Image (spheres, rainbow, N blue to C red):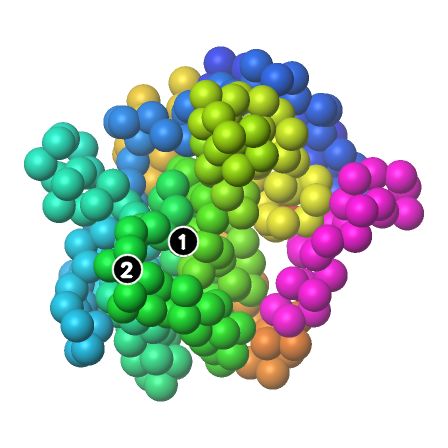
């Protein structure tokens, strides 16, 4: 086990299964939440345009309309076709409104499933990039089948024959994130967060006060180190010094190394074995204690740093 400094603080690198990172403090937990939401953090299209060429975006769900909060399409990645799907936030007020702050509606998830289906039929790997405060919670989205669209997206990812990788690149909250998160390998950037609800949402439900978000974050600890320790993610991807927002190019280069290696590992496995391992991976999530007395059981296989 070794220590490397990223993002202005020491992050414990976990060398093998059963070894655990040091428990982060309350300040570190909230810092991670804020870093995951940083306005200059690279978004889905920032990574796609740097990691692949000839990206062609697919629009519309062929039922109701298009959803700009979710990007889906096909690109050439390391001389092979790959399907990329992910939430897209905006940089300024106009774009954030257009992208609905990365909160997709049912049309977005149906568009994602459309791309997944094409990729599965053509034998093309699927990569999802997760970055959302949650699916759009408005009444109009519920009227158009928000819950059903998310559940069907989860079900489809569960059944895909092709290699699948999910990457939490920023804020991964609620069903909006989980709808793209069922994959053979789940990677998470060092300063990302991943949880079933946002801290504000949890505090509003538990204490009727969204202002207690910091307390909620301390309660369920949605950081990358904890998600790895509990087996929710398979590897923590380092970020440039100061965070991914300080150097988009380097952040994309680091993620590219992890992603390329993960795809290579998955290519070596027969489709039936991948699907079986994917199901086993998610079925193992949830034990309260592991044999060594930790808080959870490691469900996946770590992808060590390249080189």
Q: Is residue 294 magenta?
A: yes
Cβ atoms under marks 1 and 2 closer than 8 Å: no
What residue appears at the point 18 percent right and 54 percent down from the top-left corner? 68
Task: Please name the residue that numbered disc 1 is placed on.
Answer: 176
| SS class, disc 1 | helix
**In the rendered image, which quarter contains the N terminus?**
top right
Name above or below for residue 60 compared with residue 19: below
Front-lying residue, 113 or 165: 113
Residue 136, image x, y percentages: 31, 51
Query: Any magenta on residue 299?
Result: yes
Residue 145 x, y percent position in the rendering:
33, 69
Which mark is first along the chain, 2 or 1? 2
* Magenta range: 278-301
**Rendered-image quadrant of the C terminus:** top right
Residue 180 percent location from the top left of the image: 43, 59
Give the side of residue 286 with respect to residue 253, left or right.
right
What kind of secondary structure does the magenta stretch mostly adopt?
Answer: loop
Q: Quadrant of residue 66?
A: bottom left
Residue drawn at point x = 85 percent, y = 47 percent = 290
- Residue extending furthest toward the front: 208
Q: Is residue 188 visible?
A: no
User: Residue 235, position in %: x, y?
Assistant: 59, 45
Q: Residue furthest bottom?
A: 121
Q: Is residue 223 left or right of residue 43?
A: right
- Residue 273 left/right relative to 172: right
Circle number at residue 141: 2
Residue 90 relative to residue 114: left or right = left
> Image point 33% across, 26% down: which residue?
38
Mark pair 1, 2: CA separation: 12 Å
Residue 224 can be seen, yes or no: yes
Q: Residues within 10 Å of mark 1 (few under 14, many from 20)?
A: many
Q: Check residue 87 in the rendering and tell me which mark sits there, or answer none.
A: none
């Amino acid at each position: 086990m070794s220590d490397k400094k990223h993002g202005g603080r020491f992050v414990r690198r976990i060398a093998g299964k059963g070894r655990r990172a040091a428990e982060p403090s309350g300040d570190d937990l909230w810092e991670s939440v804020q870093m995951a939401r940083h306005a200059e953090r690279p978004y889905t299209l920032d990574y796609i345009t740097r990691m692949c060429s000839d990206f062609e975006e697919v629009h519309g769900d062929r039922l109701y309309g298009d959803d700009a909060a979710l990007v889906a399409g096909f690109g050439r990645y390391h001389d092979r076709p790959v399907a990329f799907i992910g939430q897209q936030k905006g940089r300024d007020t106009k774009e954030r409104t257009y992208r609905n702050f990365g909160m997709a509606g049912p049309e977005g998830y149906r568009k994602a499933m459309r791309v997944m289906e094409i990729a599965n039929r053509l034998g093309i790997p699927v990569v999802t990039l997760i970055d959302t405060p949650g699916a759009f919670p408005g009444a109009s989205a519920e009227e158009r089948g928000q819950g059903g669209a998310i559940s069907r997206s989860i079900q489809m990812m569960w059944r895909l024959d092709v290699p699948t990788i999910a990457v939490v690149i920023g804020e991964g909250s609620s069903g909006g994130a989980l709808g793209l998160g069922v994959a053979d390998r789940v990677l998470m950037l060092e300063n990302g967060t991943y949880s079933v609800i946002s801290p504000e949402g949890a505090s509003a439900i538990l204490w009727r006060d969204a202002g207690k978000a910091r307390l909620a974050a301390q309660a369920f600890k949605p950081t990358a180190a904890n998600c790895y320790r509990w087996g929710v993610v398979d590897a923590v991807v380092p970020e440039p010094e100061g965070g991914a927002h300080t150097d988009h190019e380097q952040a994309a280069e680091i993620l590219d190394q992890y992603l390329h290696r993960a795809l290579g590992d998955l290519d070596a496995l027969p489709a039936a074995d991948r699907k079986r391992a994917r199901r086993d991976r998610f079925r193992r999530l949830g034990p309260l204690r592991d044999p060594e007395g930790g808080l959870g059981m490691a469900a996946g296989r770590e992808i060590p740093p390249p080189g």
